[in-house]
Amino acid sequence: MSARLDRIDLKILRLLQNNGRLSNAELAVSVAISPATCHRRTQRLFEDGFIAAVRAMVAPKKVAKGTLVMVGVVLDRSTPESFATFEQAIARLKFVLDCHLVAGDFDYFLKIRVGDMEDFNRIHGEQLIALPGVRQTRTFFVMKEVVDNAPLEF
């Protein structure tokens, strides 16, 4: 962790991570500094990249995206060019929430939200297996989300 972060900065990060809707005034009271100082510190945390973004966590079921699917992808070649081509293509697919290059049995692991199995079947047949370089996919339907998007511990 950067030496530029003191205990107040860390507390601001923890508080905002748990509730991004805190107003500057509420945040200042919680960390026992003035609102102006709190605003400057929070702005610095954004500018220095400690806070990447602030956004609402939408309830997937409320917007008909209640089915979570994890997909392991194996490419036909393990070259920098094939990885780059796949990554450019996958980044354009709006239904892919996360895409990670991994070590092990797969090259990539995808996190996808869909309405139901039929929705995923359509997406899989029309778009996923048509991605450049895809040799094999293995699909895992999530039965229960035990921990999802937990706050970072620091």
Image (cartoon, rainbow, N blue to C red):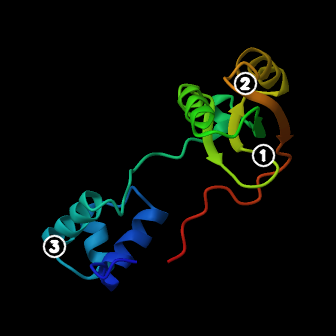
Q: Residue 74 in the image: state x and y as whole percent.
A: 77, 38
Closer to the camera: disc 1 or disc 3? Answer: 1
Task: Examine the image and state in which quarter residue 20 appears.
Answer: bottom left
Which residue has dot 2 on it? 128
What's the distance in space between the residues labelled 2 and 3, CA to CA?
48 Å
The amino acid at mark 2 is: Leu
Q: Name the residue nearer the viewer: 38 or 118.
A: 118
Tell which circle, 1 or 3, labels the residue nearer the N-terminal end: 3
Q: Residue 5 in the image: state x and y as whole percent.
A: 31, 79
Residue drawn at x 26%, y 82% is: 32
Q: In which quarter of the image is the N terminus?
A: bottom left
Residue drawn at x 69%, y 32% is: 65
What's the distance in space between the residues labelled 2 and 1, CA to CA?
15 Å
The amino acid at mark 1 is: Phe
Which residue has dot 3 on it? 37
Q: Residues within 10 Å of mark 2 (few under 14, many from 20)?
A: many
Which residue has dot 1 on it? 106
Badge 3 marks a residue whose secondary structure is helix
Q: Are discs 2 and 1 less than 8 Å apart at CB? A: no
Badge 1 marks a residue whose secondary structure is loop
Residue drawn at x 68%, y 28% is: 64
Using residue 59 as the reference point, say whether residue 34 is left or right of it. Answer: left
Q: Residue 138 in the image: state x and y as whole percent.
A: 85, 37
What's the distance in space between the residues labelled 1 and 3, CA to CA?
47 Å
Q: Residue 73 in the image: state x and y as whole percent.
A: 76, 37
